[in-house]
Amino acid sequence: MKVIEIREPGGPDVLQISERDEPVPGAGQILIRVKAAGINRPDVVQRMGLYPPPPGASDIPGLEVAGVVEALGSGVANFKLGDSVCALVPGGGYAELCVAPMETCLPMPAGFSYIQAAALPETYFTVWSNLFDRAGLSLGETLLVHGGSSGIGSTAIQLAKAFGAKVITTVGNREKAEFCRELGADLTINYRKQDFEACVAEYTDGAGVNVVLDMVGGSYIAKNIQCLAPDGRHVSIAFLGGPQVEFNMLPVMLKRLTLTGSTLRPRDNAFKGAIAVALQKNVWPLLEKGAVKPVIDTVLPLGEASAGHALMESSGHMGKIILEI
């Protein structure tokens, strides 16, 4: 089968197309003939040599796929050959065939293309787990999400609005601001021209936000803490601005804040499977009636994975970057 390999740690040009033996599904696994695979920020970090796959996972990049069930390992009863599925995988997505744990496979939403379905698993699993399970975002609360035009950001905006929250987001230009407003954002802040801490204070009349979903880290952490309302929750899921931060803990104590974070890839299949169950129950109906949707920026053939990574690093995209196979 054709795959994309990381020749050595480095820039996008280290991704190369190659041939490998077809994988065989083990107990509790599903072999998927991949029709489309999503490109995500963790793939870029893995390519740089900074995010190795967990033990037992494929070294081929790619954390989400959509395709057709090709073969079933022992013990798989909830899918059959020929089913159209999408799946969160610990690696191996940039390939013609990919093995997925049965727990993290979901039926494709009705009416979806493989390209649309491949844009779902990584972002929807991540956003649901962090916004609703970990941060407990609820009806009537206000969310601040940074990077609203990214795959994670565009998903967070839509899901937060669908469940009755207000959304504030930061963006880098006017085009991205309009994009986020169309997705439902109540306030967009151009971080290049505006101080988001001051804008949040003005918009909320000094009350602050209930939840911050942060992918930046660095200097944003201290400002995020100032933006939080009493009993607010701060969730870190990436550190594009660096993980080393210095901030005053006094507001954390006085406002009874919760600072937390997570990484999804190393978690076990049971944990991810519980998210899959919640998504199928709570989010799949919204997808099927068009209340929320994956936003696709660019679709590239498998052999142009390096161009997809370059686009991801440029932050010029709005929504998901997908490889079609």
Image (tube, rainbow, N blue to C red):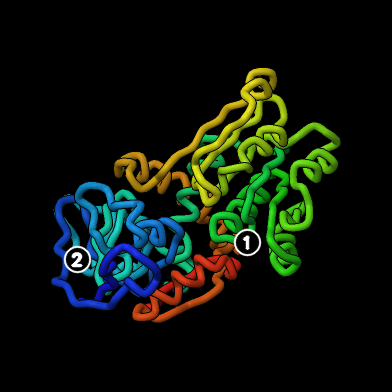
Left or right side of 138 for 41: left
Question: Is 127 on the left-hand or right-hand side of 175?
Answer: left
* Label 2: few (<14), some (14–19) or many (≥20) C-alpha neighbours in 10 Å: some
Spatial separation of the CA atoms under disc 1 and disc 2: 37 Å
Report if the CB atoms under discs 1 and 2 are less than 8 Å apart: no
- The answer to whether residue 134 of the structure is visible from this angle is yes
Q: Which residue is mark 2?
A: 71
Q: Return the residue nearer the eye: 110 or 10.
A: 10
For the N terminus, the quadrant is bottom left
> Is residue 303 depicted above or below 178 in this figure?
below
> Which residue lies under the disc numbered 1?
149
Q: Residue at x 64, y 53 (%)?
A: 157
Q: Mark 1: which amino acid?
A: Ser
Q: Residue at x 39, y 81 (%)?
A: 301
Instruction: Give the answer, above or below, for where 257 lies relative to 24.
Output: above
Q: Nearer the viewer, residue 280 or 209?
A: 209
- Looking at the figure, which quarter contains the C terminus? bottom left
Q: Position of residue 111 (x, y in %)?
A: 50, 71
Count numbered badges in the picture: 2
Determine whether the residue tagged by mark 2 lies in a helix, strand or loop.
strand
Q: Badge 1: how crowded within 10 Å, few (<14), some, or many (20+)?
A: many
Q: Is residue 162 above or below residue 212?
A: below
